[in-house]
Amino acid sequence: MARETETTLTVLETSDVHGHIFPVNYGTNAYAGLGMAKIATLVKEIRRKEKNVLLIDNGDNIQGTPLTYHYVKFMSGEMNPVVKVMNHLRYDAAVVGNHEFNYGMEVLERAVGQSDFPWLSANLLDKGTGEPYFGKPYIIKLFEGGLKVAVLGLTTHYIPNWEKPEHIRSLRFEDTVESAKRWVKKIRAEEKPDVLVLSYHGGFERDPDTGAPDEAETGENVAYRLCMEVEGIDCLLTGHQHRKIWGKTINGVVVLQPGCNGQYLGKATIRLKKAEGRWTIIGKRSEILPLENVPEDREVIRLCEKYEEATQKWLDRPIGRIEGDMTIKDPFEARVKEHPFIELINRVQMEASGADISGTALFHDEVKGFRHEVTMRDIVSSYVYPNTLVVLKITGKDLKAALERSASYFCLNAKGELAINPAFSHPKPQHYNYDMWEGIEYVIDVSKPVGERVVRLTYKNQKVEDDQELLVVINNYRASGGGEYTMFKNREVVREIQTDMTELLANYFLEKKTVKAVCNHNWEIRTGDGEGLHPENRI
């Protein structure tokens, strides 16, 4: 009998880095314990200590910071800074995430062309040929001792529900689970790997511990199904939800999700034993490694210094002033009672589009609104997505359904006080899926059942009828039905404004010079008797 030997495979995962290279909070310019410069330090240290290391990015890496926005708008003739860092770190592969498409296919294809590593996605197919659009659906990597590892890439097939059609017109999105079944079976049969890693830009639709539903099973996230229904997966890398998931095995599959913005590095350790010429897995575990106290890699800092310096100069450019107070001190309160910042966003959307009904969200709790002097830094940190605007023709019934969807953001706690519905905070914060509207008057009563909470809805002082036609302006994500706003999906598009919202906001300030912080109080949230609006009581 041949002598047994043992080895270890280390799988390192980054996911949802969203363009964070430098350890900085761009909104405040304060130091932040995150970013690819810190990831680089840890990756290099692990490679020095361990011999079989696989480095995979799980998607959503080229979009998300002012640095990536500034690069696309003003420095696109240079190499993509995120790709430059990934090449330096010798990534083995990257998976295409949904936010990779936000700047358009041309920007994505340029990034792919600049990469020294393949971009994987087996289920994003070329409409013409039916083959994987980005070339390789999987890679094979050989390690010392003949250890053979396969990495298959998949992307959430829910992207058409969010992305601009022109950004994905060449693609067909195949069902994630069906694609996984076919490709895993093919790889196992033809390549015969010792370890099969599936890197899926998507998350869990069920609790990894109990299997209980975590969210509506729309198909956006199917990681639990992948573990339960696809035979032959050893390790499942996930992302998209920005969750921190580690130390768990589902149906024999070790799973991992390393949060977002480069705050953690995911690590799966797979132990193997070789007997009679064949490697067998004898143990596996996963963990996430915090980066807050890890020093930055100076080589990465030097590689991207010119991008950062140009971005910082651009961010500090003053473009206008606020008369009054447009800062957000409590994000919960800004969603309960109309806030001048939200009213301004809606006003800009209405002016840019010509529509007189507008809806928008306060995207996340870190948005601070605008101080007296407004810079580009304030704009890009307050409006964090590269959204454009769409004017839709909808009915009064559609509008009421949208308001009901927003009304489900709230619930009453045990004391009868207003709180956030846990479905909007777990498993992933979804504050961006609560909209506030301008151009209509409405009252929401949270004491009533979900679906019956809109107790008043008028337009130009007249009750909105179900069959009444209305023109509304919303962002492209919402117009495509994103956030379970299915009432907007496939409605007639009257007009599209291709300039993204950060530019529209900047232009608004450059034209107006001074903007007043005002509210017209056209909407109200009630809890039955009007009492119980306590921002400190939230779930």
Image: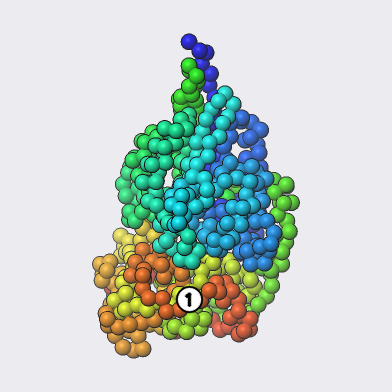
**Closer to us: 47 or 182:** 182
Q: Is residue 88 left or right of residue 156?
A: right
Q: Is residue 526 above or below residue 224?
A: below
Residue labelled with disc 1: 496
Question: Toward the viewer: 190 or 334?
Answer: 190
Q: Residue furthest bottom?
A: 461
Q: Give the camera-side residue of 244 and 186.
A: 186
Q: Secondary structure at mark 1?
A: strand
Q: Is residue 342 left or right of residue 531?
A: right
Where 12 sits versus 274, above or below?
below
Closest to the observer, 253 or 129: 129
The residue under the point 42% across, 79% down is 494
Horizontal and vertical percent position of residue 15: 53, 49
Give the quarter of the figure containing the C terminus: bottom left
Q: Is residue 244 visible?
A: no
Residue 265 point in image, percent of width and height: 56, 43
Residue 222 in the image: above or below residue 100: above
- At x 46% / y 47%, what residue is drawn? 122
Within 10 Å of disc 1 (Cα), the crowding (few <14, some 14-19, many 20+) is some
* Residue 280 shows in the view: yes
The three-letter code of the residue at mark 1 reads Glu
The residue at the point 32 percent across, 64 percent down is 412
Q: Is residue 477 above or below residue 305?
A: below
Instruction: Where is residue 277? Give x, y as percent.
Output: 50, 19
